[in-house]
Amino acid sequence: MRKKKIFPARKLRILIPIILFLSQTVCAQHESKTINDGWKFHKGECEAAVSTAYDDSTWNSIHLPHTWNTDAYVEKKYYQGTGWYRRMLTLPQSWKGKQIFLKLDAASKAATIHINGKNVGEHAGGYTASTFDITPFCTFGTPNSLAIRVDNARQDIPPISGDFTFFGGIYRDVWLTAVPKQHFHLTNHGSDGIFISTPQVSQEKGTILIRGEVKNDANQKASLELEHTVYNPDGSIAHTKKQSIQIKAGELYSFRTETAPIPSPKLWTPETPHLYRVESILRDKKTKTILDHSNHHTGFRWFNFDGEQGFCLNGKPYKLRGICRHQDQKPIGVALTDEMHRRDMKLMKEMGANFIRISHYPQDDALLEMCDKLGMLAWEEIPIIDIVPDTPGYAENCERNLREMIRQHYNHPSIITWGYMNEILLVTQRRYKKEEELKPVLERTLALAKRLEDVLKEEDTTRVSTMAFHGSNSYNEVGLGSITDIVGWNLYQGWYGGDLTGFERFLTEQHQKYPSHPMIVSEYGAGSDRRLHSLQPHAFDFSIEYQQKYLEHYLPVLEETPYICGGTHWNFIDFSSALRDESMPRINNKGLVYADRTPKDVYYYYKAAWRHDIPVLHIASRDWTHRAGVQGEAPVMLPVKVYTNLPEVELFIDGKSLGKQKATNYTATFEVPFSRKEHFVSAKAENKEATTGIRIIEDGIRLNFTPTPMMLNETNLRGLELAVNVGSHCFYTSDESQLTWLPDQSYTEGSWGYIGGESKSSQGQIQNTNDGPLFQTLRSGIEGYRFDVPNGDYEIEFLFTDIFRENAAAVYLLDRNSGAESRENRFSIIINDVVVEEDFSPCRESDYFQALRKRYNITNFRNKIEIHFPVRNGKSLLNGIKLRKLY
Ligand code: GCB
Ligand code: CA
């Protein structure tokens, strides 16, 4: 047995003071912790909650991060109003004599803090942090009541317009900090009061400039020592500097130290994100006790934007391969954990991106930390969108939010540009058509832009300024184009209007007119819905294949046009936009990944184009797992596309080779014969690897297939369920039943199809169904439908939704259906001369934009089923049809 060591009393007498001394130096420091747990929440106004005695036992128990707006996934009119958060806060006795700070990383849009019934302060701005010195309001050792009123309805705080949900709540961390009376300036616009830059930077040498302020909150002057240490990426010390300072009671002391040149610094690039650590320590001069300390990362890099050459990083041309990123995730809204933000950054990096537009507002520190660490250049902006209102206080709030963003994220080497306006003329021009009405709005827009530009340059001379414009030269005409250092263009040719080639035409024209303007394509994208697939995709059909087609057109233009600095795809994720309808109501589905972050096919297109260090091979239209086709003679030929960065691909169906193809634009497309209920499609390619020689890269997917006969006869009708997405060229697979509805076809003898009419569609949300896209397309003025089927018993189902009502879309939505005809449509339905519905009006039976399904059992004695829709008023219409053989 081991003998227990027992300290003799004499030794203890020596040890105890040492332990006490050590614990004192530790305790003396800056202590920070989250207080995310144990909150109570009440939706609605509740001024009484300020009072210490208020009984919140009926409120909901919640944890932060929290948002009250998960309703935005269901309701267009999501809750915009007030919410209250309450919590008890007991500060340890040992904190007495310290300075206590409360920091909210984000509360949207505005927060008012109350402690023990007293108003501590307010913060206006939903995307930047705010720090309050709560020392005078608190007691130690006994509970303090903390009540925070949050408001997401304020119209004097940006954003007030935009294609995304303004989620309300305290949706990022809340921190409690205790520091000795002398500390860094922790209430400096939500920053930690230290600002690091690299005034000299080249291959040969770099210097680091550390600026900041120290505050003395004591009643007597303080003699302090301030020490900065710079650590090399390998952890060794590159530089230290110490200075003595004296600060009077209650005063702020500004410091500014530049290191000696560090020779041959390791440069920060997205490929080599070398970080130098800067440690700043504040000590008591006499006792050497550490009072405050902080750590930051910085990096050595320089860059340049040029109208002709595009972007240069560390002296070399460098294409910005980027994405825009919103911060929400269905179904939790914006209350994401840090790991979720980090997960997004890893996914973008994995895809090969080197640039992110943090849009349309400042985002979580976790995201910025990852930009630095993973190597992702960044554009960050404040959310001034669509129009500048004349609301009192608005401009001041914009200015403060801009300063906050810059100070809070100043130290991140990843950030290269700050932005402050997005498509600011979009709603402006739509709302004010008359010259005299427009003029004052343009004037205040320009005035605000100039004011913010000055503020930006006052705050930060090391980065450039930017704005994002929608595709109209009017930005240049009114003078906005020349205010910022660089311009971003949000371009949607081939989506909201025009054709795909309009994209490069627009850029060429801009470049010719304004050759000195450095340009980024700050947005481009197309919506997609995994339930919709098409062999002839076109704009606004929301098919997975149109998104592919659109991006396969845009990306090469961005890559191959030297004067374009780069692009940021809109958007990395399918994000929440409560006002949007379209195929997935409440969601803008232009993501490269779905809301749950499962990659869409196009994610792999980018990955193939951008990653050269690893082989990429991906069979596309992957989530089209229930394929269907009309079969003339077996088998049905359907295209299968592969995304790859390897030179050549071989495709197999059920192990049988369909030959090899060279990839162009990172794609290879094969015509594949489908004939069975289940197929296994696989792709193989050779990758030449430096160490191991040739390695075979493979991908494979299992696909279900349902053929529908072109010619209907006795032999092929068994089990027939012929479902047609009338009015559409898209296959639609229901999420709920997995039934695939075929694209419509016009009737030919012996087969089936529509007679007459024209296809029409709407982006309006369809009620009563989760199969919206099926009902959003229809044939208007359809005369009839015909199936040349043999005699027997059948079930026929009709899908109807009247979409012919003017639908006031949100003004910022570039709606394609505005101005749609408004009418009531009434018609009869006759099946094989039997009138099954007389003077039927879909909109009267279940209102406009409501799904309606009608099913009839019939016995066919004529060797065909002939349906007619004689019109009584307006036009006939049909959104879907299904024929099932019963007996
Ligand atoms: C834009 C806006 C962005 C929208 C996007 C879209 O131009 O800047 O906020 O979400 O278009 O999808 O329409
Ligand atoms: Ca349809």
Image: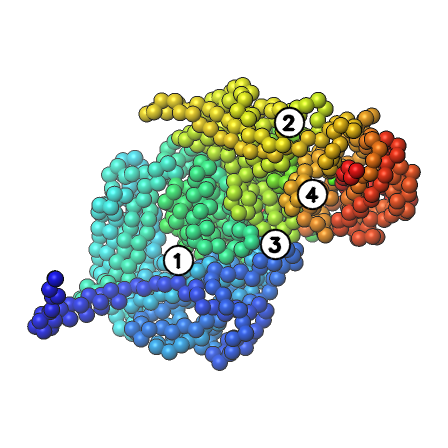
Q: Which of marks 4 and 3 is nearer the N terminus?
A: 3
Which quadrant holds residue 723?
top right
Which circle's residue, 1 or 4, is located before the other in the chain? 1
Q: Name the kind of residue labelled 3 in the image.
A: Tyr
Task: Give the distance between the C-alpha atoms of the residues marked 2 and 1, in whole angstroms.
Answer: 63 Å
Residue displayed at 64% across by 55% down: 74
Q: How far apart are marks 2 and 4 (CA)?
A: 27 Å
Q: Position of residue 574 (x, y in %)?
A: 56, 45
Label 3 sits on residue: 73
Mark 3: secondary structure: helix
Tell us which disc is closer to us: 1 or 4: 4
State the mark number for residue 773. 4
Identify the residue position indicated by label 2 in the image.
675
| Ligand 1 rendered quadrant | top right
Residue identified by numbered label 1: 191
The answer to whether marks 4 and 3 mark residues whose Cβ atoms lie closer than 8 Å is: no
Regarding residue 724, the answer to whether it shows in the image is no
Q: Is mark 4 within 8 Å of ligand 2?
A: yes
Query: What secondary structure is marked by label 4?
Result: helix
Residue 836 seen in the current view: yes
Query: In the image, 858: left or right of 445?
Result: right
Q: Which of marks 3 and 2 is nearer the N terminus?
A: 3
Is 884 above or below relative to 388? above
Is tag 1's residue or tag 3's residue first in the polypeptide sequence?
Answer: 3
Could you tell me which secondary element the residue under label 1 belongs to? Answer: loop
Give the CA separation, mark 3 to mark 2: 40 Å
Can you tell which of label 1 and label 3 is closer to the viewer?
A: 3
Along the polypeptide, which appears first: circle 2 or circle 4?
A: 2
Identify the residue shown where x is 53% and y is 55%. Answer: 332
